[in-house]
Image: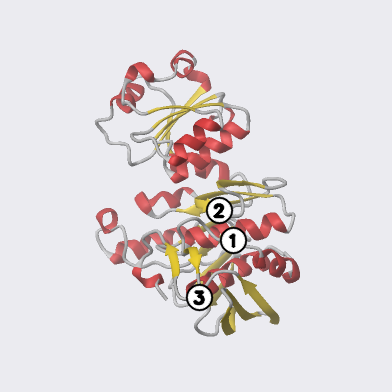
């Protein structure tokens, strides 16, 4: 039985942001879903309320009975954060159960569609959430696996009217994004990060270069201007650059911030597309919006529909998340952005 067709799913590290989106997806499909995590959190409580059975003790005795008694119908999924001395993980490997990394399972799902993958050492969560919102609001058959909680949909799994386009955050940690072969890829940045994995900035750049070369034939690659990545020579790939700071294939000009909203003129390869508005501050978010608009336009969505959808984009929890906006004070909750994004 193929992995995606299995009936029983057991997630080791189910409380991770990427793992929980996959768990929600298979629960949505009507599969039986269990999970282990070290700590009970607000997210795991939500998963329990959605019908998933989760335990918080590393004990072989707590592995779901159906997973053990029906191995041919079961799939075990683990995150690289699971330590190699984990009792349940090692027991299941010794049992020769069918085990996949989270990134492998995500790749199987995304690669079966006209996948849209967003990579970058910063910006990828916001851009992937923006793209998902634009496609869903434009009534395209799209869905998404996100690395954050969308404030519009209150979830890291967005389900639209189909799965022709599956949007995914392409995580560079542990080189996970090399499991993806998307139809459209966006690369927002490639700064020195995860050097415990890569060892050097040069190795980070090499891996992002490999990711860029995995775009499918007749696909699309959208790059922050200045990044040095190109697809393999001789392939029919459309390549576009974007920026909010300088001219590019897609770029923002006349940026203003008025009453809590950013407004700018979008310039595309076809010319100026008039005023665009987004309810998020900061030039970084204008640049994120340009990337998302470039993706939508490249997929054939009319600009007017994108403009309307972007105006209603509420953002991502803990990504420049404004909690209080008073006359004298503004309180913003933000999740450990890379320093390059503070602008």
Answer whether residue 121 is visible to the viewer in this image. yes
Residue drawn at (31%, 66%) of the image: 192
Mark 3 vs mark 2, CA separation in Å: 27 Å
Q: Earlier in the sequence, mark 3 or mark 1?
A: 1
Left or right: 188 in relation to 81: right
Residue 109 location (% of width, % of height) = 56, 42
Q: Looking at this view, is 108 or 155 the one in front?
A: 155
Q: Earlier in the sequence, mark 3 or mark 2?
A: 2
Q: Residues within 10 Å of mark 3 (few under 14, many from 20)?
A: few
Residue drawn at (26%, 34%) of the image: 84
Q: Find residue 9 and name its label.
A: none
Q: Looking at this view, is 45 or 341 the one in front?
A: 45
Q: Earlier in the sequence, mark 2 or mark 1?
A: 2
The residue that mark 3 highlights is: 327
Q: Nearer the viewer, mark 3 or mark 2?
A: 3
Q: The N terminus lies in which quarter of the figure?
A: top right
The residue that mark 2 highlights is: 150
Residue 343 location (% of width, % of height) = 42, 76
Is there CB contact under 8 Å for labels 2 and 1?
yes
Residue drawn at (58%, 32%) of the image: 27
Q: Residues within 10 Å of mark 1 (few under 14, many from 20)?
A: some
Question: Quadrant of the rendered structure where residue 151 is?
Answer: bottom right
Mark 1 secondary-structure assignment: loop
Answer whether residue 298 is visible to the viewer in this image. no
The residue that mark 1 highlights is: 314
Question: Quadrant of the rendered structure where residue 280 is?
Answer: bottom right
Mark 2 vs mark 1, CA separation in Å: 8 Å
Is there CB contact under 8 Å for labels 3 and 2?
no
């Amino acid at each position: 039985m193929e992995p995606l067709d299995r009936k029983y799913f057991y997630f080791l590290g189910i409380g991770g942001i990427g793992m929980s989106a996959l768990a929600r997806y298979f629960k949505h499909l009507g599969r039986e879903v269990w999970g282990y995590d070290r700590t009970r959190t607000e997210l795991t409580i939500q998963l329990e309320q959605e019908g998933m059975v989760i335990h918080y003790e590393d004990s072989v005795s707590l592995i779901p009975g159906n997973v053990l008694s029906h191995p041919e119908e079961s799939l075990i999924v683990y995150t690289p954060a699971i330590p190699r001395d984990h009792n349940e993980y090692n027991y299941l490997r010794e049992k020769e159960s069918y085990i996949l990394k989270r990134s492998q399972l995500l790749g199987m799902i995304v690669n079966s569609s006209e996948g849209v993958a967003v990579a970058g050492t910063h910006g990828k969560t916001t851009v992937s959430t923006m793209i998902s919102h634009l496609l869903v609001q434009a009534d395209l058959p799209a869905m998404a696996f996100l690395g954050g909680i969308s404030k519009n949909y209150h979830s890291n799994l967005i389900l639209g009217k189909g799965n022709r386009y599956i949007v995914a955050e392409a995580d560079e940690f542990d080189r996970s994004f090399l499991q993806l072969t998307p139809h459209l890829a966006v690369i927002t940045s490639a700064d020195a990060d995860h050097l415990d994995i890569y060892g050097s900035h040069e190795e980070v750049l090499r891996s992002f270069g490999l990711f860029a070369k995995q775009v499918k034939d007749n696909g699309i690659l959208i790059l922050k201007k200045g990044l040095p990545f190109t697809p393999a020579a001789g392939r029919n790939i459309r390549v576009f650059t974007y920026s909010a700071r300088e001219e590019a294939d897609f770029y923002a000009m006349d940026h203003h911030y008025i009453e809590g909203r950013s407004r700018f003129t979008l310039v595309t390869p076809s010319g100026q597309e008039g005023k665009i508005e987004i309810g998020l501050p900061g030039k970084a978010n204008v640049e994120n919006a340009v990337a998302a608009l470039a993706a939508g336009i490249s997929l054939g969505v009319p600009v007017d529909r994108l403009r309307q959808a972007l105006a209603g984009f509420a953002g991502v929890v803990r990504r420049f998340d404004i909690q209080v906006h008073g006359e004298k004070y503004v309180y913003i909750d933000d999740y450990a952005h890379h320093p390059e994004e503070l602008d």
